[in-house]
Image (cartoon, helix red, strand yellow):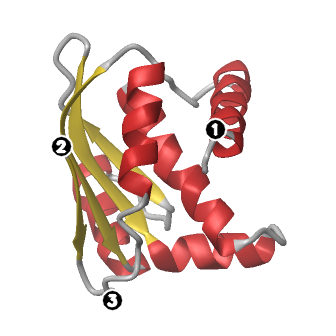
Amino acid sequence: MIQFFYENVPHSVNTKYIKWLEEIIFAEEKKLGEINYIFCDDEFLLKINQDYLQHDYYTDIITFDSVKGKTISGEIFVSLQRISDNASTLSKNYEEELRRVLAHGILHLCGYKDKTEAQEIEMRSKEDYYIARYN
């Protein structure tokens, strides 16, 4: 089950994305476990970044993996404020940037990484593929 929660931000993400995210999981030949998206502001996510990852910078997403075998589970924290800023900086549509970040979290749980340049290219390719399949 995929659920949406909110910390320090209005309830503004349409639950229509849940079906699409489930389709990504099934297309990657994984099983759906429990996935919680926690939408928040920059300061909330910065604190998580500092406390759990010892990073002192803003980010748009942090994914905590609880995957067991092919069953995808985890906590995905998303800064809506950072997505808005990134969309503006990149001259992208907010909804498209939101979809990219939502897919990014799921892809991490499916086993994709983005630490090296090759991994980042593969991750971006997967994101683009699933964004194009969004109805």
Q: Whole-Å distance between the Cαs marked 2 and 3? A: 22 Å
The location of residue 64, given as percent across then percent down, is 26, 41
Q: Whole-Å distance between the Cαs marked 3 and 1? A: 26 Å
The location of residue 65, given as percent across then percent down, is 25, 33
Residue 66 — which label? none
- The image quarter containing residue 78 is bottom left
Residue 10 — which label? 3
**Lateral position of residue 66 relative to residue 96, left or right:** left
- The image quarter containing residue 133 is top right
Q: Which residue is mark 2?
A: 1
Q: Is residue 93 visible?
A: yes
Q: Which residue is mark 1?
A: 127
The location of residue 32, given as percent across then percent down, is 23, 29
Q: Whole-Å distance between the Cαs marked 2 and 1? A: 21 Å
**Residue beneath the point at 72% across and 19% down:** 118
Of the residues shown, which amino acid type is indicated by label 2? Answer: Met
